[in-house]
Amino acid sequence: MQKPSFTIGIEEEYLLVNPETRDLEPSPPPELLEKCEEALGNHVSPELLRAQIEVATPVCSSMQEARDEVARLRRTVAGIADEFGLGLIAASTHPFAEWEQQKTTEKERYLSLADDLQQIAHRMLTCGMHVHIGMEDEELRVDLMNQAAYFLPHLLALSTSSPFWEGRSTGLKSYRLSVMDELPRTGVPQQFSSWGEYKRTVDVLVNAGLIEDASKIWWDLRPSARFPTLEMRITDICPLAEDSICIAAIFACVCRMLYRLRRQNQRWRSYPPVLIRENRWRAQRYGTEEGLVDFGKGCLVPFAELIEELLELIREDAEELGCASEIKHVRTIMERGTGADRQLERFIALKEAGAGEREALQGVVDLIRDETVSFPESWG
């Protein structure tokens, strides 16, 4: 079996906001995207809704390279948005924007999607982060997808950034997932015995005319339809880029750890998807606050304890991939909270200081906008 390259690619989706009202801009000028494309080429693209914009790093050979690319992409798009009088925010939902006011991007792919999914597509006012790990062997891609699904709730919990929806605190740390789960072909992936079984399943959907190709399968984790990678899709987008890089590094290390076990004729214990979905719900609801089920122990374990166990589990892999400092940043996430935690803290603080509901939500937008282009000094 060919040794995986373990290259890294990161995709992020952003929202464009009016800096005065802090609401979404449903009709940004087309010149904004054109200027982004001039600066970034095919590393920037439109999304389903016109208020969204997507970026993708090149194929990166190290986490440090991916980090530099994410910073470059954020700075470039935010700078160009500013030239057009708009702000950029990296959060998986806008605190108070209404999906009914948004406009679909007039491209064939998005218009076709909107026609197929109807109101579900129009409600897709969410943004996410996808991480690709280079894995050239097809059989390995499917085998590691089966095993890595166990860790999806951990990654989701660390990334949560969508506690608000249409001006309401939802009580969930990742409301984005509730919106995403309305789509067909989403959630925890099915287990497959081989690449052949996976391919035959996709072919049934394609040959029946239900989907054009595997890109219309939106599982939390999937073999990429376009690249020789395993693509993690469960995470919210993090307002702070350093949190994004930490989560991407953990996913890369988990993939390498599972590959290392395979080389030793070992594997991660398989658990029924119904159990993984329980942890997925807990991560969606509570983020890092209430812990997840350790299925080996058969009981709830505090999230901080699970993270320390995970850090030890992938320590060797982080050293091999050169991202030991990036994964240790997870302790900082635990200390200061996720994007969702900080949004809720800001909202409560502003309310207690006498702000009205709308004013407090606007303050949350300001927080996200500041964090989106905030980078550690060490990043340069």
Image (cartoon, grey):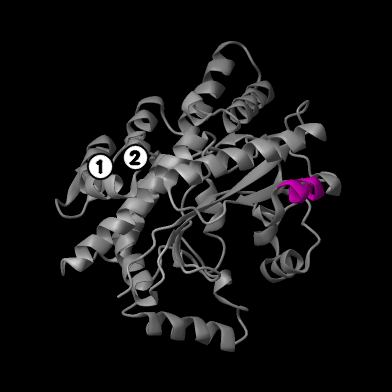
Horizontal side, residue 250 vs residue 54: left or right: left
Horizontal side, residue 312 vs residue 364: left or right: left
Q: Residue furthest top?
A: 353
x%, y% of residue 102?
A: 76, 49
Whether 231 is drawn above or below 241: the answer is: below
- Secondary structure mostly seen in magenta is helix
The answer to whether one can see residue 269 in this image is no
Question: Quadrant of residue 147 in the image?
Answer: bottom left
Numbered circles on residues, count: 2
Disc 2 target residue: 327
In terms of sequence position, does the residue under pointer 1 or pointer 2 come before the other? 1
Q: Amino acid at mark 2?
A: Ile
Foreground of the two, 270 or 347: 270
Specify whether residue 13 is painted magenta. no
Horizontal side, residue 158 vs residue 162: left or right: left
> In what element is the residue under mark 2?
helix
Q: Amino acid at mark 1?
A: Leu
Whether 315 is drawn above or below 220: the answer is: above
x%, y% of residue 53?
A: 69, 48
Question: Residue at horizontal 22%, vertical 37%?
Answer: 305
**In the image, which residues are magenta?**
33-39
Question: Residue at horizontal 76%, vertical 66%?
Answer: 111
Which label is found at residue 311?
A: 1
Whether 190 is drawn above or below 204: the answer is: above
x%, y% of residue 306?
A: 24, 42
x%, y% of residue 117?
A: 66, 67
Specify whether residue 38 is painted magenta. yes
CA–CA distance in space, label 1 to label 2: 7 Å
Question: Residue at horizontal 63%, vertical 79%?
Answer: 212
Q: Is there CB contact under 8 Å for labels 1 and 2? A: yes
Quarter of the figure that contains the N terminus: bottom left
